[in-house]
Amino acid sequence: MGNFIEEFIEADLKSGRTDHVLTRIPPEPNGYLHIGHAKSIYINYFMTAKKYGGKCNLRFDDTNPEKEDDEYVSAIIRDAKWLGWEGEIKYASDYFQKTYECAVLLIKKGLAYVDDITPEEMTAKRGTLTTPGIESECRNRPIEENLELFEKMKSGAVADGELCLRAKIDMASPNINMRDPVIYKVLHARHYRQGDKWCIYPLYDFAHPIQDAIEGVTHSLCSIEFENHRPLYEWVTDNIKEFFPFSPIQREFARLNIERTIMSKRYLKKLVDEGLVDGWDDPRMPTLCGLRRRGYTPSSILNFIEAAGVSKADSECAPEMLEASIRAELNISAHRAQAVLNPIKLKIINRDDNWSDVSYEEVLPGLEQPLKREVTISNELFIEADDYSADPPPKYKRLTEGAVIRLKNSYIVKCVGHEGEGKDTTVICEVLDGSNGVDVEGVKAKGVIHWVDAKNCVDIEARIYDYLLLPFDGIHENFADRMNPNSLKIFYGKGEKCLLDASKGTSLQFVRNGYFVRDINSSGLVFNRIVGLKDSYKPKS
């Protein structure tokens, strides 16, 4: 049994309303795609067009020249293809002439008029949910006068905001969107593709159904905030049948919302413009390029969206649900390596400076043949600073004076003291003979810690990311009041030399520290943490 959109499409195919499926993804090129757009791509392409053997256009809603740019167009195409979309690329601006002709058609049919009302007056006369709107004095202009004024708007003889074109529908409609909405505005702004050819631009609610009709879209699938706009969508398509007899049908689905995640493109742009993040591809951003740089895969994102489900009811997903999706992949595919993020020295005093030993076989889940790599050990190691305590708390199971622990996949050592303080601390240990990867009779290690050979390692930078927003406290609605001051922590650590062979974009499991990816934008050995090792997500029953 499919969801309500699949049932709707299958009913259309069965009834003969259409014998094929053509959908569209209509981003505005005023920012980068984020994970909310990924849901639209999933529904319009993977769940419908691809499933039913149809097509899905990527159509840029570039009707607002003041905010749009080629940079965003290129980024959107790249990110949509990265996610797996394939299809034709279209531009709303290529349809400006036909959209203009549709507006002229409505004027000639007495269904649109030019108004000189100010935005403030229009708002005041729109009415409320319980009171009807007030008709403009311009509503009954003669058709010829409306055609002349609209041509004057198009010719550039009218200043911005001086005149607008409104649909003539019903000022008493219970749906405020139907109370003579503006469908064209005057805007003297250079368009990134059309240049100065146009100084009038259609509004989205008017242009969108016309663009769908031009392309022959069978199912216009959009987010739930457009549900109240559907009557206007249908009004437009019903009244342009002289040009386009076949009418697309609009249906709506709930937006993707994730706790502690900013899903407003406008606010994400503000973060970029104010330098609060390191660009649109900052790994803390929910943009597709940010998620890619963070180490997420297209399949992990799509699996998450599929698991979140398609409905008409708004809800918020736990961010741990997305983390669980990538963690499930990485647990199978990511190579293991040892890295110490906050290092202090460990000195083995019962071995000389020339001592070197140990190699072990790593068995990587999902591989037919075990992956082998040689890991050396010497009398000088690096360990995590918090794996040693001179004054340990109760139940401490790591290094402290007198404690016996195992170095992961290697020897058992006994701590006999330390030298220095803070980052200059050196933990002094003795290694137990015959304990390399095996138990020693009568000796029970208190715990296991990871380590890196100090004589065979590389310097690394590890970036630990948290959510951009603090948890909602029930009071602070504004994003600015919820910004997480600890959303990024940087550590300068030590890693195995094999990290030199990790190409940019390679994902690894740093033992005990999480899953990391080598940063695609950095020249050095910089690793971004994708997700922690522990899965705390529990699906709701």
Image (cartoon, helix red, strand yellow):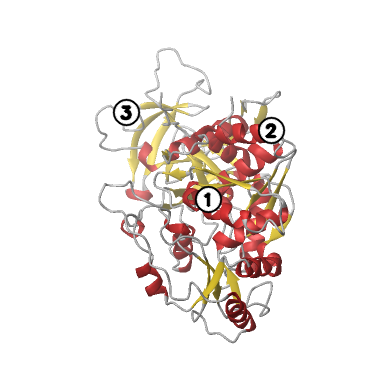
Q: Is residue 84 visible?
A: yes
- Amino acid carrying label 2: it is Ser
The CA span between labels 2 and 3 is 79 Å
Labelled pair 1, 3 in contact (Cβ < 8 Å): no
> Could you tell me which residue is drawn at 38 percent across and 63 percent down?
133
Asked if residue 216 is positioned above or below residue 320 in the image, the reply reads below
Mark 2 or mark 3: which is in front?
Answer: 2
Q: Name the residue under label 1.
A: 230
Q: Name the residue under label 2.
A: 15
Could you tell which of marks 1 and 3 lies nearer the N-terminus? 1
Q: Which corner quadrant holds the C terminus? A: top left
- Amino acid carrying label 3: it is Gly
Say the numbered circle drawn on residue 516: none
Label 3 packing within 10 angstroms: few (<14), some (14-19), many (20+): few
Q: Can residue 459 be seen in this view?
A: no
The CA span between labels 1 and 2 is 22 Å
Q: Where is residue 354 in the image (x, y as percent from the top left)?
A: 56, 39
Label 3: which secondary element: loop
Out of 388 and 132, give the one closest to the viewer: 132
Q: Position of residue 144 (x, y in %)?
A: 61, 78
Q: Which corner quadrant holds the N terminus? A: top right
- Amino acid carrying label 1: it is Arg
* Residue 119 placement, left or right of 160: left
Q: Mark 3 points at which residue?
A: 402
The CA span between labels 1 and 3 is 73 Å
Out of 510 and 196, give the one closest to the viewer: 196
Label 1: which secondary element: helix
**Residue 390 figure quarter:** top left
Could you tell which of marks 2 and 3 lies nearer the N-terminus? 2
Labelled pair 2, 3 in contact (Cβ < 8 Å): no
Label 1 packing within 10 angstroms: few (<14), some (14-19), many (20+): some
